[in-house]
Amino acid sequence: MDIEQEIKEQINANPILLYMKGSPDAPQCGFSSRATQLLMHAENRSLL
């Protein structure tokens, strides 16, 4: 599967999708950190 198809499938399969720097446990920028905090607060805990 090519990357474009993989991204399309991820978008179609998830109501909220965030591509970020780092990981949820170790975000690498302020935006990624804040976005992770907001998603965790909203209980969208299925983070890849």
Image (spheres, helix red, strand yellow):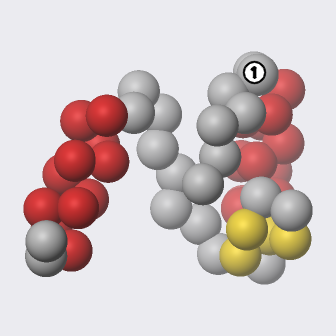
Please identify the quadrant where the N terminus is shown.
bottom left
- Location of residue 29 in the rendering, given as x and y in whole percent from the top left corner: 77, 74
- Location of residue 33 in the rendering, given as x and y in whole percent from the top left corner: 81, 59
Please identify the quadrant where the C terminus is shown.
bottom right
**Side of 6 where 41 appears, left or right:** right
Identity, as a three-letter code, of the amino acid under mark 1: Ala
**Disc 1, SS:** loop
- The residue lying furthest to the front in this view is 1
Residue drawn at point x = 76 percent, y = 48 percent: 36
Residue drawn at point x = 26 percent, y = 59 percent: 7
**Whether residue 44 is situated above or below residue 6 in the rendered picture:** above
Residue drawn at point x = 72 percent, y = 33 percent: 45
**Side of 36 where 3 appears, left or right:** left
Q: Name the residue under label 1.
A: 42
Quarter of image, res 39? top right
Quarter of image, res 46? top right
**Whether residue 7 is situated above or below residue 3 in the rendered picture:** above
Residue drawn at point x = 84 percent, y = 42 percent: 37
Front-lying residue, 39 or 2: 2
Residue 25 visible in image: yes
- Location of residue 35 in the rendering, given as x and y in whole percent from the top left corner: 71, 47
Quarter of image, res 42? top right
**Whether residue 2 is situated above or below residue 39 in the rendered picture:** below
**Side of 11 where 15 appears, left or right:** right
